[in-house]
Image (spheres, rainbow, N blue to C red):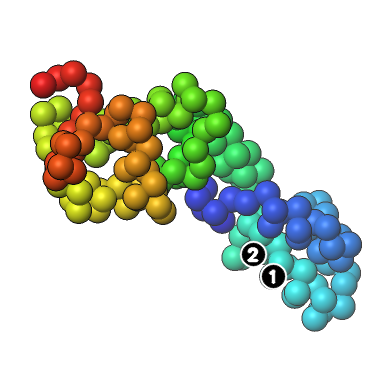
Amino acid sequence: MSESTADWRQVFGALANEETRKAYAQAVLGIPGDLPPVRQAKAEKNLQAAGLLTAEGLVDDGVYARTLAVGASRMPKEGVDRFLDADGRIQRYPKNPSERLSLLRSIGARVLKHGEELDELDLTLRLEDIADDAVLLRRYLVDYGVLLRRPDGSEYRLGDGSD
């Protein structure tokens, strides 16, 4: 089992079965398995799938460290990242107005550069990479003053005072 696939659910799932757990204990202790051959083979296959045994049937002592390391590498999200998925797309909008404004400012900075102007279609296409409802996001960006829209609606730019 590699670091990227170490999964505690597979480990616990394998050890939840009494026969598989017994086969694992016997492997750890270095004593021959005493299950019927078909059941022994099935138990070993489950232990290998979970990463508890190597393909050669040896105990993999590193599985626990790898499984813990995968879980430990997931740091809790902070700031606007709490509202984004792993791909940087909006999962949900904050209810708190100041948090919503922070999220929208962050998105505005991602989609437009200072001094850049985009027409509605190009802006919407960029926003589609960030939200399922790009039109709603565009409306929020304008309503919260993150983006400014020309009176005729032809162009959008950052409302950061950089012009």
Question: What residue is drawn where x is 40% and y is 52%?
Answer: 133
The local crowd at label 1, few if under 14, some if 14 to 19, many if 20 or more residues have their Cα within 10 Å, is some
Q: Quadrant of residue 101?
A: top left
Q: Is residue 136 left or right of residue 7?
A: left
Question: What residue is drawn where x is 80% and y is 73%?
Answer: 40
Query: What residue is shown with label 1?
Result: 45
Measured along the vertical axis of the image, is residue 56 above or below residue 151? Answer: below
Question: What residue is drawn where x is 75% and y is 74%?
Answer: 42
Residue 49's disc is 2
The local crowd at label 2, few if under 14, some if 14 to 19, many if 20 or more residues have their Cα within 10 Å, is some
Residue 110's disc is none
Residue 41 point in image, percent of width and height: 75, 75
Q: How many marks?
A: 2
Determine the secondary structure under disc 1: helix
User: Label 1 amino acid?
Assistant: Lys
Q: Residue furthest top?
A: 161
Question: What residue is drawn where x is 22% and y is 31%?
Answer: 148
